[in-house]
């Protein structure tokens, strides 16, 4: 009997319902950690992923394959696959790849982005408009399709189920972003009010105002929609900017581009301290012989790839990958920019775009402490994609590190005082081995209902399952 009550008291405290315990004292007493619990290998492609609202399954895309994966308590298991067929290639294309995925709020279908990958088209900068396919779940049958802009990448579906957004990156000429002939990327808003079989879309242009680099050629990379479905954000990575799209109270029928208000925010630059000489496996940058004393100061553009919105809609959180093609020999706000990458996550006010704080040097320090690989002379650990969630009243950011085969967990509850909580190694074999990353993790989603994190690893075609433990 006594034991039972102790157990109940323990559960109540564990769920964070204990009265009289303030959030602050709980945070001070709580250690939040991540544990790698499973790795699912041999997927056809694992570029990006989405997780169902109830957290029971994930849909993973990459190459020409879509895979439905069940998320168990301790393991991941394949439930079905779909291979792209010629019938669903973009018009005037002989080859394409899946680049992004989102799952409807009721879990009945997934939207997947199909990007032209026809070599002849790409070679002449004539990439054709891509597509979004609707696949029924769990049977993965094509039930709808709509043509979108060029180079569709990330996809998101609004929590209210009424619309979706696609980042049409349109990176026709990665070598020369200064070329004024380059086509501007756009955002496609897809109308889902008639269901996935009757999708229609409108391409929304991105204005030049507020974009610090290459304003003539915005390149949206990652899109997310707020929990209340009232606004969209997109990273404009090569432009070092973030676009916020505010929606009208009611969507017009049919959708019109001028119904959406787009505001751009400058993502800014960061000066940090890091290991910036030599490549992985050479000289000072051997993981087995990292030395904090060898670090040098550098200044880089943040150039975020991944972005997330906190559940309360107050903050935007970015994974600052950086992109060399854009920043070489460039200056920003009067400062010369280095090619070393920002190596940070950053938090901005979602309403105003004001920069509030970043993770400082902590991501690289975590990589060095864990003896994980990184590309010292280019982007360091390379923060790629970010997911956010709340665990025991703490707002956490989970970031994939592409060159380090790991994720970091930061407490961003106070954006001006971001704290590293843990580093989760996804590839234990590589620790201290002086080899380059083998998994190259990118996609990441936190599952709030289950305190789990799922990661997609494109290089190895695998998925990692991580449990978040609060003690
Ligand atoms: Ca372009
Ligand atoms: Ca890009
Ligand atoms: Ca990237
Ligand atoms: Ca990358």
Image (spheres, rainbow, N blue to C red):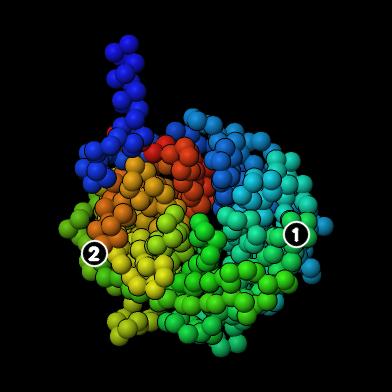
Mark 2 close to ligand 4, CB under 8 Å: no
Please state if 384 lies on the left or on the right of 421 as rendered.
right
Q: Residue at x 53, y 77 (%)?
A: 262
State whether residue 448 is above or below residue 122.
Answer: above
Most extreme residue toward the top is: 1
Query: Pointer 1: what residue?
Result: 194
State whether residue 45 is above or below residue 208.
Answer: above
Q: Are marks 1 and 2 in contact (CB under 8 Å)?
A: no
Mark 2 neighbour class, 10 Å CA radius: few under 14, some 14 to 19, many 20 or more: some
Residue 260 is situated, as x and y percent measured from the top left of the image, at 59, 75
Residue 383 is situated, as x and y percent measured from the top left of the image, at 40, 58
Please state if 244 lies on the left or on the right of 300 as rendered.
right
Q: Which quadrant of the figure contains the C terminus?
A: top left
Between disc 1 and disc 2, the foreground one is 1
Residue 248 is situated, as x and y percent measured from the top left of the image, at 58, 72
Q: CA distance from mark 1 to mark 2?
A: 52 Å
Q: Residue at x 40, y 77 (%)?
A: 266
- In this view of the protein, which residue sits in the foreground, 265 or 310? 310
Q: Quadrant of residue 204?
A: bottom right
Q: Which mark is residue 273?
A: 2
- In this view of the protein, which residue sits in the foreground, 434 or 356? 356
Residue 5 is situated, as x and y percent measured from the top left of the image, at 31, 18
State the SS at label 1: loop
């Amino acid at each position: 009997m006594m034991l039972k009550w102790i157990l109940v008291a323990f559960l109540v405290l564990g769920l964070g319902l204990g009265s009289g315990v303030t959030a602050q004292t709980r945070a001070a007493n709580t250690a939040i950690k991540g544990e790698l619990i499973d790795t699912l290998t041999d997927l056809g492609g694992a570029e990006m992923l989405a997780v169902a609202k109830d957290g029971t399954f994930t849909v993973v895309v990459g190459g020409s394959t879509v895979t439905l994966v069940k998320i168990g308590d301790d393991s991941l298991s394949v439930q079905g696959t779909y291979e792209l067929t010629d019938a669903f290639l973009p018009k005037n294309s002989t080859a394409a790849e899946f680049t992004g995925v989102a799952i409807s709020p009721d879990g009945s279908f997934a939207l997947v982005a199909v990007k032209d990958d026809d070599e002849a088209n790409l070679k002449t900068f004539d990439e054709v408009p891509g597509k979004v396919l609707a696949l029924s779940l769990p049977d993965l049958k094509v039930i709808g399709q709509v043509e979108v802009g060029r180079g569709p990448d990330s996809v998101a579906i609004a929590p209210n189920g009424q619309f979706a957004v696609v980042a049409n990156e349109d990176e026709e000429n990665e070598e020369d972003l200064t070329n004024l002939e380059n086509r501007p990327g756009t955002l496609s808003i897809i109308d889902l009010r008639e269901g996935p079989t009757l999708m229609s879309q409108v391409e929304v242009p991105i204005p030049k105002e507020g974009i610090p680099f290459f304003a003539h050629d915005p390149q949206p990379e990652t899109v997310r929609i707020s929990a209340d479905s009232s606004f969209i954000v997109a990273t404009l990575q090569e432009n070092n900017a973030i676009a916020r799209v505010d929606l009208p109270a009611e969507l017009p029928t049919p959708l019109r581009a001028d119904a959406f208000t787009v505001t751009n925010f400058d993502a800014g630059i960061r000066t940090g301290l890091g290991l910036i000489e030599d490549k992985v496996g050479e000289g000072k940058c051997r993981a087995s012989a990292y030395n904090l004393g060898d670090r040098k100061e550098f200044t880089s553009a943040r150039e975020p790839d991944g972005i997330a919105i906190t559940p309360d809609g107050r903050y935007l959180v970015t994974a600052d990958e950086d992109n060399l093609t854009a920043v070489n020999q460039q200056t920003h706000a009067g400062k010369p920019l280095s090619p070393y990458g920002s190596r940070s996550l950053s938090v901005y006010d979602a309403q105003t775009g004001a920069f509030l704080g970043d993770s400082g040097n902590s991501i690289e320090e975590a990589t060095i402490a864990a003896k994980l690989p990184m590309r010292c002379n280019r982007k360091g650990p390379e923060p790629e994609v970010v997911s956010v969630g709340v665990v025991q009243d703490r707002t956490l950011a989970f970031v994939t590190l592409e060159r380090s085969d790991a994720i970091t967990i930061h407490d961003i509850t106070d954006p001006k005082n971001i704290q590293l909580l843990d580093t989760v190694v996804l590839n234990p074999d590589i620790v201290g081995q002086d080899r380059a990353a083998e998994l190259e993790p990118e996609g990441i989603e936190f599952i709030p209902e289950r305190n789990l994190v799922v990661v997609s690893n494109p290089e190895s075609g695998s998925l990692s399952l991580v449990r978040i433990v609060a003690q």
